[in-house]
Amino acid sequence: MNFKVPRGTQDILPAESWKWQRVEAIIREVCDMYRYKEIRTPIFEQTELFQRTVGDTTDIVTKEMYTFKDRGDRSMTLRPEGTAPVVRSYVENKMFGYPDQPVKLYYQGPMFRYERQQAGRYRQFVQFGVEAIGSADPAIDAEVISLAMEMYKRVGLKDVKLVLNSLGDKESRTAHREALVAHFTPKIDELCSDCQSRLAKNPLRILDCKVDREHPLMATAPSLTDYLNEESATYFEQVKRYLGAIGIEYELDPNLVRGLDYYNHTAFEIMSTADGFGAITTLCGGGRYNGVAEEIGGPPSPGVGYAMSIERLLLAMEAEGKSFTEDAQLDVYVVTLEKAAHEKGFALLQQLRNAGIRADMDYLDRKMKGQMKSADRFNAKAVIVIGEDEVNNGVVQVKNMADGTQEKITDATVIDTLLEKLR
């Protein structure tokens, strides 16, 4: 039987994994600069956690979650997103009692959604996200957005734009909900079955429909920003002023609602404008989610955050022709010519590594020509050659691969000599 990688997943091979490592290093650098600390949560959680927070009318909950019963007959779900687990941990571990608020956290790891595979979208994907929990200051909204923009700047992306909207507070959304119901009801039969069921449960979700997004009713739907009360409108204006103060440009989109029910007030997406990136341009999205902590039994703890797909970040870099430089050059390759030399070379190899020198050798008993070809493929800076004479005389031959020069060095001084040459 031939086994293959499951549909909607991928193997990240060494030729690509170093790029992921570079992105992850940038993530750590930027988060450290903004004072966001890493949190690691389980890959699976109680199903109800996502039902209560993400929303039981969202596509994620109704169609995309990987849910299973464990041996205790408890319903568990592979995490489809990162915010709910982080807030659960915030509440469970009483982080709301920390003296410094908001608590600034970041996470990265695999998420799981059963959706149709597309370019840059997988059923298992790697997500990076930040959460700032414990402050209702609109400046934190702007900080979270600036962190996202800084991340894309650090990897060299230029063709990106920030799209912004306000979903308002509960009062504003109730007024908007009534207007949406009145707008869609007369022609609801023209929309898909999901939209028809959402009309009664959560009409705002209709605006996020992937099937009917081009329907004329969508373009003429009441704008949420027209129903913002004074408090919500003031909050949104403050967020925009903070963004302006730090020079971040944005576009307003009154139909931007995001795909999760927990969002309120600020909602945003960062999109790629690069030619050839694809029909789905969103790179990351997020917003404010006041009320989530209370929904799962915690005290009032306003939060704001965002999440980005590492796969789509790398895809955007490719679309813009951006790339990292791989530092794959080997310092030293050890070539051995017979069994005793192989034993000596193996011991020397460990000494080189202990000294911080990147080194390797042959394990296939190849002739000298084959070993030298390997040294070339690894782009080795130097080659150590050990044969019978070298074993008997306590020396090694060191060849500089850049200029072809070769010299004999004693076993006792080879490490120090190489360190000096490599330096």
Image (cartoon, rainbow, N blue to C red):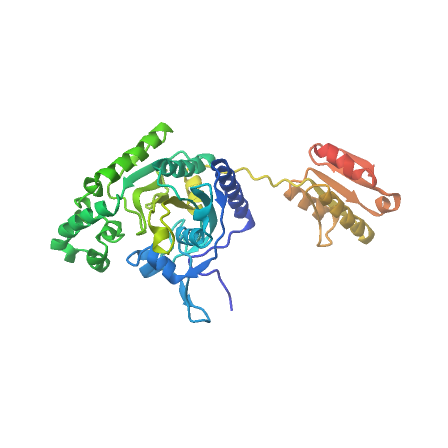
Give the x, y percent position of residue 285.
36, 44
Give the x, y percent position of residue 420.
74, 32
Nearest the viewer among 121 and 354 is 354
Looking at the rendered image, the quarter that the C terminus falls into is: top right
* Residue at 31% across, 30% down: 241
* Relative to 378, 81 lies left or right: left
Nearest the viewer among 17 and 408 is 17
Q: Furthest-left residue in view?
A: 186
Q: Quadrant of residue 50?
A: bottom left
Nearest the viewer among 308 and 1 is 308
* Relative to 184, 150 lies left or right: right
* Relative to 364, 281 lies left or right: left
Give the x, y percent position of residue 27.
49, 41
Nearest the viewer among 30 and 313 is 30
Q: Quadrant of residue 88?
A: bottom left
Q: State how many labels appear.
A: 0
* Residue at 33% across, 41% down: 268
Q: Can residue 182 be seen here?
A: yes
Q: Quadrant of residue 160?
A: top left
Q: Can residue 321 be seen here?
A: no
Give the x, y percent position of residue 119.
39, 49
